[in-house]
Image (tube, helix red, strand yellow):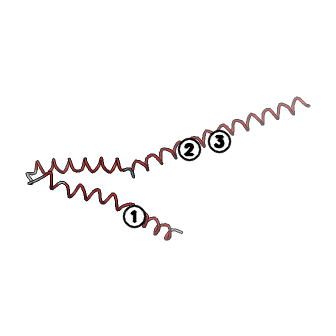
């Protein structure tokens, strides 16, 4: 009788250990995903990204204006490139306003 009780206890303990390992694995997967999401969000809002896109936008517009025979492409390309930069700076304000109003409508 003691043998069966001992065996049952071991079996239950093994099942509980397995469930705990599964839970640990699931929690780790969630933590890893959260880290990736946080990193992606940090990249999306980083100044490095904004400056990189600003430079690439400027170069692309200069090339377009150069091949389209538009005068002063290096100076003329500044306006649209700066316009892009300004749009990235104002969007967080608009986003906060939108989220606030969206939350009110869906509450």
List the residue tagged with mark 2.
31
For label 1, the residue is: 93
Q: Residue at x 11, y 49 (%)?
A: 66
Question: Whole-Å distance between the Cαs marked 2 and 1?
Answer: 29 Å
Extreme top residue here?
3
Residue drawn at 38 percent across, 50 percent down: 46
List the residue tagged with mark 3: 23
**x and y, in percent, of residue 105 in the image:** 49, 70
Q: Position of residue 31 (x, y in %)?
A: 56, 44
Quarter of the image for residue 93 reads: bottom left
Q: What residue is at 18 percent from the left and 51 percent from the top?
A: 61
Classify the position of the N terminus by image quarter: top right
Q: CA distance from mark 3 to mark 2?
A: 12 Å
Q: Secondary structure at mark 3?
A: helix
Q: Which of the two discs, 3 and 2, labels the residue nearer the N terminus?
A: 3
Q: From the viewer's perspective, is 69 left or right of 83?
A: left
Residue beneath the point at 56% across and 41% down? 29
| CB-based contact (under 8 Å), mark 2 and mark 1 | no
């Amino acid at each position: 009788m003691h043998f069966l009780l001992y065996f049952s206890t071991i079996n239950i303990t093994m099942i509980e250990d397995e469930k705990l390992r599964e839970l640990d694995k699931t929690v780790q997967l969630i933590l890893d995903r959260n880290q990736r999401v946080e990193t992606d969000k940090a990249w999306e809002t980083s100044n490095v990204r904004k400056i990189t896109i600003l430079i690439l936008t400027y170069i692309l517009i200069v090339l377009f204006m150069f091949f389209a025979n538009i005068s002063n492409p290096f100076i003329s390309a500044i306006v649209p490139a700066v316009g892009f930069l300004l749009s990235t700076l104002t969007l967080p304000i608009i986003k906060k306003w939108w989220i606030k109003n969206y939350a009110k409508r869906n509450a």
